[in-house]
Image: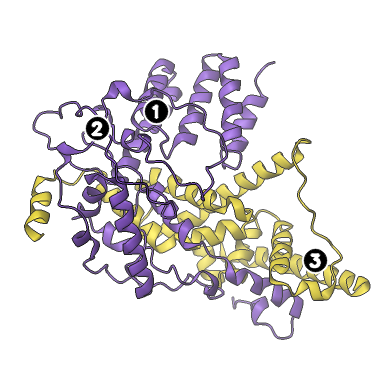
């Protein structure tokens, strides 16, 4: 069966319809959107932009920003993430077509050249490699068990993010979750770099024997997060509520402000409902909706708390 | 530097078991993030919610990597995008129904023609028109008219019979054309 002529290609059709269809040509994520998603999903680590199809200027700018970010981190963590890949994904996910958001051709996957990343210069800019045992870390006892409810409003971009100890705190990984420290999230590129500052903290608990602690890149962290939330879900489905809550507590302990916070919250609410702790379920649900009002999971949470008996 | 890099590699443990899966997720992200983003946007997710929705699609994919057939990654992502977009749209509608929430500015059905050429305005109207299409028709319309895919490819990706795709596309195009004509008539009348 032959395809009909597309509306945008049909000169005999409505010009108005063509202009409406053409208005979707500019649909494309911004480079910030792409970089943010890559970071949250752990698929790009430090190589947010610059390699691949980006312009040389973009690449240079990105390299400069990254160097600032790495210095600002003031620790070897960023460097370890930066340098770690034998992993080819670091080369591939170059998030390259930063310069083309408004020029995506109609009707098609955005053209993107997938050049392998060249050897990148910033390695030369960074301080000497430091092996993981020297990473700043906090002991598990210092890690907040459950993150407090975070206000739904993000801090204004213009306000420089303080070199908070929250970043180093993310390095903590309970041994049960993953055998290695977790790389911290790379800060937003637009953030004004805080002065280099390393928070002096007690050394991390000793690593399990025979396992060399290695810098975990984002992907492994996401995998660990997914594994924990899935475990909680499985335990809940099996009716093992205490085990489900234990897995969730483990998740929050290991990944304060983790990327799957919303999913973990939903499982928590479902578990509380299953254990008939309706007041707590409602409170968690309300907090969830305040924190993630636009989440695709919001509908589900509303439906869960709406069904709770008053 | 080379020796340091080698040392680092030597010190690193064997690739974690999740690495292969993560590689695949990275491949999918690299090749299809823009497509997913465009898709959720065109399936009716509001601009300020598109980033979250696109990310959600990949979170779902990351949990189902083993069940995604090789070569069917894009189709899987689009199928997931349809569901995530529907959930997001419902969540937004639900929020709007709450009396405490600010009502969104309704689409003015009688804009003057000169306004209609305005790109942003046109995009809003397109949103509205696509949202008026039935759920089972919208993805096919979007893939064909906006993404430029062939009907055969759409049928293959959505695992639908070619006849079903053809009939839904025909219905979608008819509805779209009728609604466009209605808007044009009103604009002419009022403009």
**Quarter occupied by the N terminus of chain A:** bottom right
Image colour assigned to chain B: yellow
Q: Between marks 3 and 2, how big is the CA–CA gap?
A: 65 Å
Residue at image position (64%, 65%) is B141
List the single residue furthest toward the bottom.
A11
Residue that numbered label 1 is attached to? A252
Q: Between marks 1 and 3, how big is the CA–CA gap?
A: 49 Å
Mark 1 Cα shell of 10 Å, populated few (<14), some (14-19), many (≥20): many
Q: Position of residue A218 (x, y in %)?
A: 31, 46
Residue that numbered label 3 is attached to? B179
Callout 1: SS: helix
- The tag earlier along the polypeptide, 2 or 1, is 2
Image colour assigned to chain A: purple
User: Taking A25 as reference, is A72 left or right?
Assistant: left
Q: Position of residue A246 (x, y in %)?
A: 38, 20
Mark nearest the camera among 3 and 2 is: 2
Residue at image position (43%, 37%) is A260
- Identify which residue, A52 or A66, lies in the foreground: A66
């Amino acid at each position: 069966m032959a395809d009909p002529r597309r509306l945008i290609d049909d000169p005999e059709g409505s010009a108005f319809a063509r202009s409406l269809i053409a208005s979707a040509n500019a649909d494309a994520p911004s480079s910030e959107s792409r970089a943010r998603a890559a970071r949250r999903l752990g698929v790009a680590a430090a190589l947010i932009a610059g390699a691949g199809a980006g312009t040389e200027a973009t690449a240079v700018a990105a390299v400069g920003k990254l160097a600032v970010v790495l210095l600002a981190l003031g620790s070897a963590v960023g460097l370890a993430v930066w340098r770690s890949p034998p992993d080819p994904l670091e080369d591939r996910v170059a998030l390259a077509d930063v310069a083309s958001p408004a020029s995506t051709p109609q009707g098609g996957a955005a053209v993107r050249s997938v050049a392998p990343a060249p050897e990148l210069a910033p390695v030369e800019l960074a301080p000497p490699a430091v092996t993981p045992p020297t990473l700043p870390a906090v002991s598990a006892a210092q890690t907040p068990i459950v993150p407090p409810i975070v206000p739904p409003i993000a801090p204004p971009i213009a306000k420089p993010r303080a070199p908070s100890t929250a970043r180093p705190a993310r390095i903590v990984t309970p041994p049960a979750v993953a055998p290695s420290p977790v790389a911290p999230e790379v800060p937003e590129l637009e953030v004004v770099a805080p002065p280099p500052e390393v928070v002096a903290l007690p050394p991390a608990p000793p690593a399990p024997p025979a396992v060399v602690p290695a810098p975990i890149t984002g992907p492994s962290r996401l995998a660990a997060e997914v594994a924990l939330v899935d475990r909680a879900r499985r335990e809940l489905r099996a009716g093992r509520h205490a085990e489900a809550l234990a897995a969730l507590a483990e998740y929050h302990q290991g990944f304060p402000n983790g990327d799957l916070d919303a999913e973990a919250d939903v499982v928590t609410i479902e578990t509380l409902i299953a254990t008939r702790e309706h007041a707590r379920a409602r409170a968690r649900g309300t907090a969830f909706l305040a924190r993630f009002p636009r989440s695709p999971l919001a509908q589900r949470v509303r439906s869960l708390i709406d069904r709770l008996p008053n | 530097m080379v020796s340091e890099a080698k040392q680092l590699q030597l010190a690193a443990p064997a690739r974690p078991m999740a690495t292969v899966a993560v590689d695949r997720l990275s491949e999918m992200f690299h090749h299809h993030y823009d497509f997913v983003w465009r898709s959720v946007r065109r399936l009716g997710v509001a601009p300020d919610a598109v980033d979250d929705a696109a990310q959600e699609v990949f979170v779902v994919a990351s949990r189902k990597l083993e069940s995604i057939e090789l070569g069917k990654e894009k189709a899987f992502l689009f199928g997931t995008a349809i569901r995530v977009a529907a959930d997001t749209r419902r969540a937004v509608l639900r929020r709007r129904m709450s009396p405490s929430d600010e009502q969104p500015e309704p689409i003015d059905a009688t804009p003057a023609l000169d306004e209609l050429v305005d790109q942003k305005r046109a995009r809003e109207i397109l949103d509205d028109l696509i949202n008026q299409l039935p759920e089972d028709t919208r993805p096919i319309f979007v893939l064909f008219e906006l993404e430029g895919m062939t009907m055969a490819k759409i049928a293959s990706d959505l695992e639908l019979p070619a006849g079903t795709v053809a009939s839904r596309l025909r219905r979608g195009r008819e509805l779209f054309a009728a609604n466009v004509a209605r808007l044009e008539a009103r604009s002419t009348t009022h403009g």
